[in-house]
Amino acid sequence: MADSLPDLDSEALARLAAEACDDRKAVDIRLIRVDEVSSLADWFVICSGLSDVQVRAIARSVEDQIEETTGRLPLRREGQKEGRWMLLDYGEVIVHVLTPSERTYYDLESFWGHGEQVRFVSSTPAVTP
C-alpha cells in the first residue's frame, strides 16, 4: 500500500463502504458492530439494491471507493454472477448487498441483532427542486 493512502480503522472503513453504497442509492443501509460477538469481522455493512443490476453497481461502488481511498481490494468476493446477494470481505469489514427479497429471507439484522446496529444517514444533503 502506498504511503500516501490512509490506513483507516475498521469503523472508518465501514462508514466509507456505507457512503459508497449511498452513492448508488442503496436502500436501508445498516452498520452492525460485531467485534464483541464474532471473530468474523469488526463491522458488517448491510444494504439493499432494488434489482440485480443495482446490487452489482452498489458493490462495484464499494470496491472502487475503498480501492481509491485505501488501495485495498476485497479479500473475497461472492455472488457477482447471480447479483441477488453480493458479499465483499475486507477482513475487519464485510459488506452485504442484497435484493429486498434476499434480505428478508436471510434477515441478517436479526441474526446479528446482539451487535450494535447503526442506521446510516447520508451526509450529503438531499437536493430539492
Image (cartoon, rainbow, N blue to C red):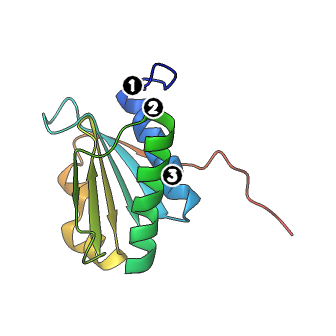
Of mark 3 and mark 2, the one earlier in the sequence is 2
Measured Cα–Cα span from mark 2 to mark 1: 5 Å
Say left or right for 98 vs 6: left
Q: Nearer the viewer, residue 1 or 28?
A: 1
Residue at which label 2 appears: 12
Judging from the image, what secondary structure is the residue with disc 3 in?
helix
Judging from the image, what secondary structure is the residue with disc 2 in?
helix
Of mark 1 and mark 3, the one earlier in the sequence is 1
Residue 17, label in figure: none
Q: CB atoms at circles 3 and 2 under 8 Å apart?
A: no
Q: Nearer the viewer, residue 100 or 4?
A: 4
Q: Position of residue 52 (x, y in %)?
A: 37, 79
Residue kind at label 1, given as amino acid type: Asp
At 49% across and 64% down in the image, what residue appears? 26
Judging from the image, what secondary structure is the residue with disc 1 in?
loop
Q: CB atoms at circles 2 and 1 under 8 Å apart?
A: yes
- Whether residue 120 is visible here, answered yes or no, is no
Q: Position of residue 7 (x, y in %)?
A: 42, 23
Q: Position of residue 31 (x, y in %)?
A: 38, 45
Q: Residue furthest front?
A: 2
Residue at which label 1 appears: 9
Measured Cα–Cα span from mark 3 to mark 2: 12 Å
Residue kind at label 2, given as amino acid type: Ala
Residue kind at label 3, given as amino acid type: Ala
Residue at which label 3 appears: 20
Q: Nearer the viewer, residue 88 or 26?
A: 88
